[in-house]
Structure formats: structure tokens, C-alpha cells
């Protein structure tokens, strides 16, 4: 492990009494979810060694540890953005730390602009895939083999089994859930109408200024990812009105109850499947980092290059291998 992570992880492990099973990253204006965490410990990012600070309105910049529906959880209330001037390695540091703390699955959320003209402000969208238009990648540079392989597979970055679970949970708690492709851009300027038309032609349904780097880093580590976007406004040119960051925050306040209900039920469902008496071992395709985490949490012990998945996930066939406001 990179020595810059060692101090961070040691600091947090000394304070978090129960190792987390699930991590959650909250986007702009979505921090109210953290209040649902029970027995919570709150640590400002500024107090965590090696942790970059978030300075965007709507991002609290606080790590919250505790339980939710009985599931040990760590919530990142606020994220770091590339447009703030941080290097990509810093942007993904909090996500990396979730994996190093033991989170086997991470729920990534964001506020996004709707590109799909059937969407409306206030819709929730399950992310099926992403398009990286950041012009860079957090894995550029020397590869740390303790995290994962040099060339990680991204064909199932937003895990198909977790997406299936999210849809089932949404139906159960009666929260409408769209599904689509998220395109990540640098910001901080909002997109032009011409750019939005181009993104639509590429197959994108929503646009934002985050998420993609974190998902790449988590996938590199073998961590399961499920993503949910809150459509806080329609993207440039879809409606004849200017884009404003305060509109993003207004929309997230309006959908707060639905958002919290969905995420609470989703975390509970993921945690139930990850309970020790329901774990089985399946061959790993995610590299040494994922195998090491599985070996630490599984019963019985997995063999080399193995990872933990739920029995329900194991029964499903493996997925086929594939040949706007300051949202975000």
C-alpha cells in the first residue's frame, strides 16, 4: 500500500469500532442521508491525515461512520472535485480509503443534469454505465499492484448484480427509478447546448462533474459499485432557462425523503447479503486487492484470487464480457 494511505487508514481504524461493510459517497445537496446513520462518529475531512478538503457549497466535507439498518457503514458526506484544482490522485483518495477500510461495496451518488428529454428534475437514475470525458484517468502513472491490475476490466464497473438488487429495492419501497448512462466532464462551467446534443448522440442520459474517477479507482480495487444520480435540473438547451447551482440544492431538498428511503433500503439489502453466514466464494476477476479483501471476510477461507459474493449473486450468471448546477 502507498505510504500516504497508511497513516489515513491507521487513523480511521483507531476510531471506527466496527469495520464497514458498505460505503456511500454523497453528491451535492445529498448530505441529509448521513443523518440517518445510527451510533455515528463524525470526522471532518480536515482532521483526517492525508485527506483532501472539499470546498464546494452543498458538500459538508465530513466522514460519518456507524450503522444503518444494522449494517456497518462509512459515509463520505461531500466529495473532492477535479475542477477545484486537485490532482486526480487526490480526487479518488476518499474512495480508495473506503476500499482499504474494508468496504466490499460502495454506493456512489451525485447530482446531475438530465440529458434524456423524458427525464424531469427530481428523478432518480440508476447508473448503468459511464462515459469518461475528463480527459484523464486516475490510474495514469505507476500502478500499485496492491490495489489491482495494470489494465482493469471496466465492462461491469456498475455491477449488474447490484443494479438488479437496486431495481428490486426501488420497487419494494415504491421509489421510481430511471436508468441510464452518466457522462463525466471536468466543469466547473456548465455544458453548452451543443455539447449536450453531442453527449446525447454518444448515448448519455445525464451529465455531471464527478463520480467517474471514483468508480474507476474502486473498480481497480475490486470493490463493487452501484451508482444513483439525482436529476437536479435539465441540461443546457433542453429547457429555455439558465442553469444555477442553487437550483441543484433546491431539487435535492425536494427529493430528500425519496432519496433517503431508497438508499437506506439499498444499504440494508446489500448488507444482508454480505452477512458472514451468507457468504460464498467464487473465482475473482478483479485482481489481488479484491482477492485480499474477500479472503479477510469470507468463511470458509477462499483460495488464491478469490472474492466474496452473496449466494444470490453467485446463482446469477456472470455478466457477458463486453468485446447540470455545480452538480456533482
Image (cartoon, rainbow, N blue to C red):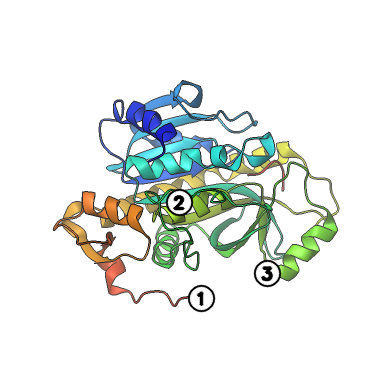
> In the image shown, does 7 or 262 lie closer to the viewer?
7
Residue 258 shows in the view: no
Q: Is residue 185 above or below residue 323?
A: above
- Tell me how far mark 3 sits from mark 1, CA to CA: 16 Å
**Dot 1, crowdedness within 10 Å: few (<14), some or many (≥20)?**
few
**Residue visible at 43% across and 38% down in the picture:** 75
| Dot 3 and dot 1 residues touching (CB under 8 Å) | no
**Taking 68 as reference, is 215 left or right?**
right
> Which quadrant of the figure contains the N terminus?
top left
Q: CA distance from mark 3 to mark 2?
A: 23 Å
User: At 70% across and 47% down in the image, what residue appears?
Assistant: 186
Q: Name the N-terminal-most of marks 3 and 2.
A: 3
Tag in front: 3 or 1 = 1
Q: Nearer the viewer, mark 3 or mark 2?
A: 2
Work out whether residue 191 can be spotted.
yes
User: What is the total number of numbered labels drawn onto the structure image?
Assistant: 3
Q: Dot 1: what SS?
A: loop
Q: Kindly identify which numbered label has been placed on residue 322.
A: 1
Residue under the point 43% across and 48% down: 144
Q: Which residue is mark 2?
A: 218
Looking at the image, the residue that sits furthest to the top is: 47
Quadrant where the image shows the C terminus: top right
Between marks 2 and 1, how big is the CA–CA gap?
19 Å
Residue at position x 29%, y 26% in the image: 14
Q: Residue furthest left?
A: 300
Of helix, strand and loop, which one carries label 2?
Answer: helix
Q: Earlier in the sequence, mark 3 or mark 1?
A: 3
**Residue 23 location (% of width, % of height):** 40, 44
Is 25 on the left or on the right of 271, as rendered?
Answer: right
View extreme (front): residue: 142
Which labelled disc corresponds to residue 240? none
The residue wearing badge 3 is 203
Amino acid at each position: 500500500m502507498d505510504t500516504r494511505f497508511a497513516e489515513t487508514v491507521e487513523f480511521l481504524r483507531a476510531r471506527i469500532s466496527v469495520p464497514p461493510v458498505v460505503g456511500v459517497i454523497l453528491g451535492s445537496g445529498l448530505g441529509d442521508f448521513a443523518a440517518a446513520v445510527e451510533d455515528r462518529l463524525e470526522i471532518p475531512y480536515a482532521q483526517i491525515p492525508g485527506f483532501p478538503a472539499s470546498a464546494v457549497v452543498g458538500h459538508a466535507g465530513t466522514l460519518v461512520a456507524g450503522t444503518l439498518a444494522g449494517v456497518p457503514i462509512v459515509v463520505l458526506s461531500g466529495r473532492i472535485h477535479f475542477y477545484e484544482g486537485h490532482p486526480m490522485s487526490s480526487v479518488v483518495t476518499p474512495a480508495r480509503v473506503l476500499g482499504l477500510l474494508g468496504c466490499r461495496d460502495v454506493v456512489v451518488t451525485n447530482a446531475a443534469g438530465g440529458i434524456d428529454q423524458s427525464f424531469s428534475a427530481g428523478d432518480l437514475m440508476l447508473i448503468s454505465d459511464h462515459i469518461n470525458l475528463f480527459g484523464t484517468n486516475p490510474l495514469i502513472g505507476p500502478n500499485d499492484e496492491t490495489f489491482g491490475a495494470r489494465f482493469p476490466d471496466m465492462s461491469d464497473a456498475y455491477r449488474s448484480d447490484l443494479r438488479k438488487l437496486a431495481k428490486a429495492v426501488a420497487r419494494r419501497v415504491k421509489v421510481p427509478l430511471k436508468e441510464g448512462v452518466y457522462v463525466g466532464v471536468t466543469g466547473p462551467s456548465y455544458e453548452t447546448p451543443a455539447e449536450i446534443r453531442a453527449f446525447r448522440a454518444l448515448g448519455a442520459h445525464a451529465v455531471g462533474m464527478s463520480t467517474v474517477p471514483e468508480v474507476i479507482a474502486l473498480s481497480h480495487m475490486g470493490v463493487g459499485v452501484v451508482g444513483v444520480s439525482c436529476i437536479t435540473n435539465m441540461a443546457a438547451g433542453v429547457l429555455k432557462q439558465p442553469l444555477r447551482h442553487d437550483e441543484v440544492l433546491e431539487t435535492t431538498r425536494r427529493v430528500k425523503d425519496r432519496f433517503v428511503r431508497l438508499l437506506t433500503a439499498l444499504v440494508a439489502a446489500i448488507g444482508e447479503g454480505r452477512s458472514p453466514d451468507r457468504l460464498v466464494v467464487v473465482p475473482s476477476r478483479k485482481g489481488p486487492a479484491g482477492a485480499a479483501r474477500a479472503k479477510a471476510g469470507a468463511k470458509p477461507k477462499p483460495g488464491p484470487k478469490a472474492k466474496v459474493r452473496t449466494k444470490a449473486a453467485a446463482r446469477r450468471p456472470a455478466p457477458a464480457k463486453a468485446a447540470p448546477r455545480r452538480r456533482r
